[in-house]
Image (spheres, grey):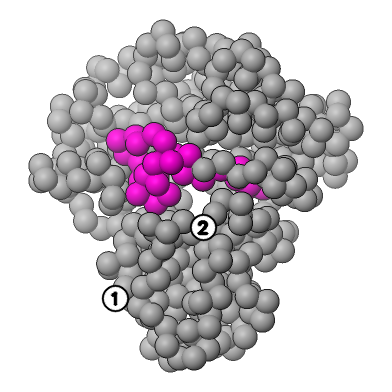
Amino acid sequence: MKFRLIYPRWEKLPEQTTFNLPPHGPAVMAAALPDYVEVEFIDENLERFSYDDPVDFVGISMMLTTQVKRGWEIADEYRRRGKKVLFGGISAMLHAEETMEHADAVFLGEAEGRMEEVFSDFRKGSLKKVYNYLADLPPIESVGPARRSIYKRDLYYYKGVQMVDLVHASRGCRFNCYPCAVAYLGGRKFRPRPIDRAIEEMALTDNNRLFVVDNSLAQDTQWEMDLFREMIPLKKNWCSHTIEDKPEVLDLARQAGAWYVYQAVFDTSDFIRERIKRYHDHDIAVEGTILLGMDNHDEEYIKRFIDFLLEIELDLAEFTVLTPFPHTKAYDDMRKEKRLISHDWNDYNAGKVVFQPKLMSPERLQELYYFAWERFYQDEPQQVKMYKLIKKVAEREMALGTYRPRRRDLIRKAFGEKL
């Protein structure tokens, strides 16, 4: 059986440097497919496909809300041609009711141990409209290595420089942040993988650079330290979302190859200032994720906020505007308060204002979003800051003896000969 798995394209934000990383969700789903399924993966951001190509069954994996309309469009065309279409992924779950109108089947939940049922039903001609496993999560011990062989590897380079491979060491999150849908998707319980299984998967990747995509590693101190301790012999460099800033944790993280962290910077407090300093003291870089448009943000606050980010010397900053995605408290609150001003899912890209802010007009918040990018990178452009991160990790790899020589001449070319 030939199964075509498509990852729909979406419009990138011009303010961000576009990295086409190999998406994790499709590779996790592909690892759960029955043995008799021949899977072909299409990342539409990097390649095109023909509807005329022979396929038996079509899957559409959607991570972002800005992918859903394109995903529906692809499905409609395949179904018009008589092909059955299965949807899955984060955004299929967040937009399940609408997605059902374009699907033969929608899969909700985690894939391990579930795909045999779906494909058996397909072969019998009895697909269910919905396979809902959101409340019936598989044992975390059943999570094996993602099936990275589906990727066309030569597509995932940035100007000739190989970027990171995505792995995860846990699922779920015990936190329930205001703009986040993770509690709906994976539950409020922290579900760590057995450390030996996570380490095995990291060791299997042929990439020295990893992105540990867990929602947060800062959920269980002992597990976190045990994980980092076991990562040390891998000699890989990695980035992740937040880790705990306790000195003993940061020391192990650095020994394990911590390269940089994505750290939410939500105010101008001494707590944030000291947290960033502790990362830097352990030679761990920080990319701040900055959310603009909260109810306490007025114009002066945002301008002071940007000055603070420069003062604490973030290595990189990624600015977004508050985006009320479905199944978040932000969405529920704004819908009740009738503050949503756009219902076009293509606008829900974290770079467009889709709601009425409390302390300014939507137009002014949009202008301040652009101002934030311009002001933060005014003295040192984004490419220069990124080059410094890449250069730093290359130097570490050379010290460890894991540096790949073909990268040496490409790093400078990737970010400009004058850097």
Q: Which mark is residue 362?
A: none
Residue 293 at least partly seen = yes
Residue 40 vertical placement versus 320 (above, below): below
Q: Is residue 295 left or right of residue 100?
A: left
Q: Earlier in the sequence, mark 2 or mark 1?
A: 1
Residue 313 vertical placement versus 189 (above, below): above
Three-letter amino acid code at the position of disc 1:
Glu
Residue behind mark 1: 101
Where's residue 376, x and y in %?
Answer: 45, 23
Whole-angstrom CA distance, mark 2 to mark 1, is 27 Å
Quadrant of res 53: bottom right
- The span picked out in magenta is 162-190
Q: Is residue 350 left or right of residue 7?
A: left
Quadrant of res 55: bottom right
Residue behind mark 2: 138
Q: Nearer the viewer, mark 2 or mark 1?
A: 2
Q: Is residue 173 left or right of residue 115?
A: left
Is 11 within the magenta? no
Residue for point 31% across, 39% down: 179
